[in-house]
Amino acid sequence: MTTVSDTGGEPSEGTPRNTNTKNYIVGLGLLFVVVLLWTGSSFLTQDMYDDGYQKPFLITYTNTASFVFYLLPYITRRLWDDRRGLPKAASSAIAYQPLEQELGIDAEPAVELMASIDQVDSPLTVKETARLALEFCFLWFIANWTLNAALAYTSVASATILSGMSGMFTLAVGRIFRVEALTLVKIGAVLTAFAGVILVAISDGSSNDQPDTLGSSVIYKAATSLPVLGDFLALMSAVFYALYVVFLKVQIREESRIDMQLFFGFVGFFNIVLSWPVGVILHLVGIERFEIPHTHNAVVIILLNMVITLSSDYLYVVAMLKTTPLVVTIGLGLTIPVAVIGDSFLGKPATVQVLAGALLVVIAFGAVGVENAKPNEGSDLLSGDSVNDTRAQQSRIRLEHEDSLE
């Protein structure tokens, strides 16, 4: 049977096991790099907040704007191709490398199905990539901004605990869209990771852990008088985080189907063009006044965070496509043990409670990683069968076929 090789963490039928294992290991390696970069960014942001420059929207906006630099290689390539007189179709063919295919010995009469799969797995055009980026940019921006803003209205402990629920939402949303199997191991891993986050958050909570002052308007004072607003923002961040990682997995599925640089370039462009009115509104109502960084330290940290975001988010999406949404979601919890190590170098030894929480996160990540690395996952608790990429492809083919008939 002719099959399309899968770059995800869950092998499709007939796909060489060693190919999927290699991609899965590469995805985990990229995820560890992302964890290191995001932990470093957290230390930098915390230092900037300590200096008194607390602008969550501006930081999110500038970080997202950095993605626009990914458009430069595409624009340069197009200008070079136009200069050489190379047709657009030929240029696209050169830039894109088709998915590997191999012919199995036990070929089956599934010509129509596999032809449909080949059609679905064709590379996204520039127009399709731009449309996908437009849909994604809002999910990404809301997920990041709401978490940054939550710290202004509630305690760090509350924000950390509620945002830590992203693993639960990712598993639930992933099960709905058939990209995650609901197994006992995954449920246990999610709950274990969440318990670890709670231990760390409670340990960090103190009398000094109060909301930071970002404004002095009547609207701001009314908002900060209700800590539930910050809790709601943190919970919203967890929901939108789960939505955007599953959204990308369902829409893209495989890294080789899309030009990732072009995709992130469009994300940066759309956020620059469409997000600035939100900043104007926040400035006018006094929630977040627009102010130029008043210290050299703040300027340097903003620039460094832009560079970190430019590389880390790119690697993060690639890691997700090579593994699964749940693996990268729980994997990001590894920032806790990495932060513990960083604090130890800064002369801030961790408490036993924090160490226990970090250990639980590591155990959870190991459990879900081993579960997804198996050739066949455990049976889904709801349907009794396994969820894999081949079934997801077939479901999408049927939906697209029904749409075309209409």
Image: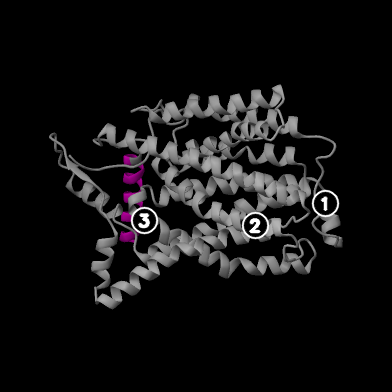
- The quadrant of the picture occupied by the C terminus is bottom left
Whether 392 is among the magenta residues is yes
Q: Secondary structure at mark 3?
A: loop
- The quadrant of the picture occupied by the N terminus is top left
Going from N to C along the chain, the mark reached first, 2 or 3, is: 3
**Label 1 belongs to which residue?**
224
- The residues tagged by marks 2 and 3 sit, at their Cα atoms, a distance apart of 33 Å
Q: Position of residue 64 (x, y in %)?
A: 56, 59
Q: Position of residue 280 (x, y in %)?
A: 70, 69
> Which of these two is toward me, 35 or 145?
35
Going from N to C along the chain, the mark reached first, 3 or 1, is: 1
Q: Which amino acid, mark 1? A: Thr
**Label 3 belongs to which residue?**
258
In the displayed structure, would residue 151 be above or below residue 202? Answer: below
Q: Which range of residues does the magenta coloring cover?
A: 390-406
**Label 2 belongs to which residue?**
300
Label 2, residues with CA under 10 Å away: few <14, some 14-19, many ≥20: some
Q: Position of residue 7 (x, y in %)?
A: 34, 42
Residue depicted at 82% across the width and 58% down the height = 220
**Of the two numbered discs 2 and 1 in the rendering, the one whose residue sits closer to the viewer:** 2
> Which of these two is toward me, 357 or 13?
357
**Of the two numbered discs 2 and 3 in the rendering, the one whose residue sits closer to the viewer:** 2
Decide if residue 9 is in sight here: no
- The residues tagged by marks 3 and 1 sit, at their Cα atoms, a distance apart of 43 Å
Q: Which amino acid, mark 3? A: Ile
